[in-house]
Image (tube, rainbow, N blue to C red):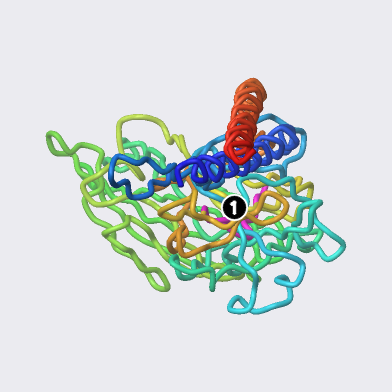
Amino acid sequence: MTISSALNAGVMGLSVNATRLATISDNIANSSTNGYKRSETDFSSMVISQSGGVYSAGGVRADTFKEVGALGSLISTGNALDIAINGGGMIPVTDLFGVEQSSTERDFQMVPTGGFYPDENGNLRTQSGLFLLGWPTDAAGAVLTGSRDSSSGLVPVNVDVAQFSASPTRNIGLSLNLPAESTTAGGTGEAFDLPIEYYDNLGSPQTLTYTFSPNVPASGASNSWSVNVVDSAGDPLVSIASFDVSFNDSDGNGGSISSITPGAGTTYDAATGEMSFNVVSGPMTSFIGKVGESDGLSQLAAPFSPYNVTKDGAPIGDIQGIEINQQGEVEAIFNSGFRRTLYQIPVVDVPNANGLTARNNQAYSISAESGDLYLWDAGTGPVGDYAGYALMESSTDIASELTSLIETQRAYSSNAKIIQTVDEMLQETTNLKR
């Protein structure tokens, strides 16, 4: 009967508004919870087939979900390991048991933000017990990127590194001018020395000395130089590399390199403009410039001018702290200024973020509704970059929730009135027998 359907509709109205009240209560209670994503209740009408001009109330159904795609505001903090995603995407984490388990057995979870700190074992974790995951690096600092469509390559981030660290110099870049008058007839033949400090495998400073000797002709100009390189770490001090370089003096090409001839123990890569040789502590490359260009060595009518000398490597340093940069690279910072990359934290993305399964501690896991994950480098594709010294606030808007609370209260009272009215009508029907 239609009167019974009205009663059922009223009862369902009470039930769905109670569900909405529960989501509003959760939202308000977590309005100060960093990384919290507000819950939403969506009402859907239910229709019963109508016939003969008689209407039967179908009622209403409630569906709840998390607005995981909603972004909260970022707030600044004083902790270098407080991180959030400045845009779309999530941070990969696991629980305490997942730290010791293999990637196939690990409980993979995601969070939008996290305040991390190293525990007694050096693992980065939150106060709620979630551990940060990332791709490790090799000894040279290169990231060992695993599969991007699974979490199999991710490992717990451990920052228990050696207190002291050094990085050997492996690349030197030279940009300097050699005086053109030195290679003309009547020149003094004076050589020019360029000492460059570098760091060996133990972080000790050593010196490479480049000696540029002009080739003085009997007449005219040779525009050529002989270069020797001596390593101070060697005993005795002997040349470890040598090459001859000639320069153009033609219109439009004046001062650029015309040819390079490497000597014994030295090789030259014309594509990169780099000279390769071995110092006492290992291999070394030195950029000197490409043929036809003057961005490395040049010869012009100007004094000997080493205007730009670059090198990598760092001396022995004491660790000062750990930071996570915008690219998600976990870096150990030493007082020598050297930064050593330990891990790279990817950003997790799924096709339907609102389909993720909500877990405790503002964490989420993959579900059939969310779709499969993909691991992006921070700031690429659809995901944002990492914001250090920051946490994401709750996406709850208190004013909006209080407004919804009033609406829900009124709707609940109205549905209760339906039940009261149906009860009175049924009472009238019962009284017909009297």
Q: Relative to 379, does residue 372 appear above or below in the rendering?
A: below
Please tell me whether mark 1 sits on a helix, a strand or a loop: strand
Which residue is at a point 41% across and 63% down the rendered structure image?
Answer: 242
Question: Farthest residue toward the right?
Answer: 120
> Residue 35: x and y, percent?
66, 41
> The magenta stretch spans which residues?
338-347
User: Dividing the picture into quarters, in which one does residue 130 lie?
Assistant: bottom right
Query: What residue is at 60 percent from the left and 27 percent from the top?
Result: 414
| Amino acid type of the residue tagged 1 in the rendering | Ile
- Asked which quadrant contains residue 417, the reply is top right
**Residue 112 in view here:** yes
Residue appearing at x 20%, y 36% in the figure: 254
The location of residue 364, given as percent across then percent down, is: 60, 56
Task: Residue under label 1, please give it.
Answer: 91
What x and y, as percent, mark residue 346? 53, 56
Q: Main secondary structure of the magenta part?
A: strand
83 is higher (above) or lower (below) than 136: above
Q: Residue at x 62, y 24 (%)?
A: 410
Q: Position of residue 328 (x, y in %)?
A: 57, 50
Residue 272 lies left or right of residue 157; in this view the side is left
Res 207 seen here: no
- Magenta residue check for 343: yes
Residue 323 painted magenta: no
Q: Residues within 10 Å of mark 1 (few under 14, many from 20)?
A: many
Q: Nearer the viewer, residue 69 or 191?
A: 69
